[in-house]
Amino acid sequence: MNTAIESQPKLKPLQGHRIGLFGRGGCGKSTTTVFLAHALAHAGYPVCVLDADSTNEGLARALGADRAPDSLLEWLGGTVFSGGPVTCPVDDPVPLSGARVSLKDLPPRFFSRASNGSLVFQAGKIAPLGPGAGCDGPMTKIARDFALAGRECETVTLVDFKAGIEDASRGVITSLDWLVVVIDPSHAGVQAAIAMKKLLEQMQSGFMPATQHLKSPDLVKLTEDSYRHAKTKGAVYVLNKVPDAETEHQLGQRLVHAGIQPVASMREDRDLRTAWLNGDPLVSASVSAEVAKIVQALEEGSLRVSGAH
Ligand SMILES: Nc1ncnc2c1ncn2[C@@H]1O[C@H](COP(=O)(O)OP(=O)(O)O)[C@@H](O)[C@H]1O
Ligand SMILES: [Mg+2]
């Protein structure tokens, strides 16, 4: 028996993974991000959360952090539109220099700590950029490329995206291991989930993104390679804001037609609405219990993909 190998600490299935949260505006991406961060930390994972929603505030406080961190956009030197180095991934697919961050190199104002000990980062917000610089492509590139390096490289990174599929169609899914798609009981929620499923299926079946606008063959190759070598394992779908069993059933029926089988169903909980209103940390026993099922589905999916099961 090889005791040297046996005594090595075993990697957990999601260590080092990047997981992105998607769905229509207000469906509960940030709510799910918070509970997923808690569930992963509870399961023993080191966790970091990247607030990649350039249009929304409040995630750090919902995570129980004492303050919102300053933006990584500032740390990286600002957007190309206002004279900085951070470009839009659609015009310039080149990997973002400095996006793999070692905590020891980063001044403390660029991160904060959630109540569960997770690290909290922020890509950047549109509002402070002012008129004329209001394209958030550079924040999308940060979301696409940001990861912890060095001692923290085994951290699970949760990326809380802005609403809709714009970031996904800018190519962020190529650098995510998993997508978590949140669906609220609405036609728009269902349609957004179907659109994400289609984007993922297109990418996985070899569909290439638009590159007509790129002048250089090197940039075309870089873009196409990022799709060809995408690390994305798949998507899990979850319901949120479900008021009752009847609504859950109706929503499930619509999703079955689209080939979507949700792995968890988070109930509407008025304490969550109140916490978001007051800027308080989110607490909900029923939602926590459901979110544990998301962790389980992601772990099982990862083990399946890696062929261990
Ligand atoms: N399970 C839930 N129960 C009750 N209200 C919820 C729930 N999830 C989200 N909400 C409400 O919906 C709003 C939007 O949720 P949020 O997580 O910020 O969505 P997103 O990040 O997708 O825009 C919150 O401010 C809160 O009021
Ligand atoms: Mg949000």
Image: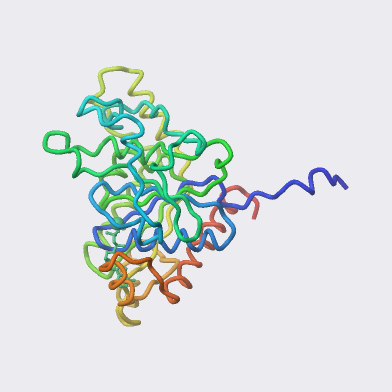
Ligand 1 occupies quarter: bottom left
Q: Name the residue nearer the viewer: 300 or 163.
A: 163
Q: Residue at x 40, y 35 (%)?
A: 227
Colouring convention used in this rendered image of the protein? rainbow
Instruction: Please determine whether, in this image, residue 248 is positioned above or below residue 294.
Output: below
Point out residue 38 in the picture as x, y percentages from the top left corner. Answer: 48, 62
Point out residue 100 in the picture as x, y percentages from the top left corner. Answer: 46, 34
Instruction: Please determine whether, in this image, residue 201 is positioned above or below residue 297.
Output: above
**Drawn side of residue 182 relative to residue 46, left or right:** left
Q: Quadrant of residue 169?
A: top left
Instruction: Please determine whether, in this image, residue 82 is positioned above or below residue 280.
Output: above
Q: Name the residue nearer the viewer: 155 or 17.
A: 155
Point out residue 282 in the picture as x, y percentages from the top left corner. Answer: 38, 68
The quarter in which the C terminus is drawn is bottom right
Instruction: Please determine whether, in this image, residue 132 is positioned above or below residue 265.
Output: above
Q: Quadrant of residue 138?
A: top left
Point out residue 218 in the picture as x, y percentages from the top left corner. Answer: 36, 18
Q: Name the residue nearer the viewer: 212 or 90.
A: 90
Q: Residue at x 56, y 57 (%)?
A: 299
**Drawn side of residue 211 relative to residue 127, left or right:** right
**Drawn side of residue 305 relative to residue 251, left or right:** right
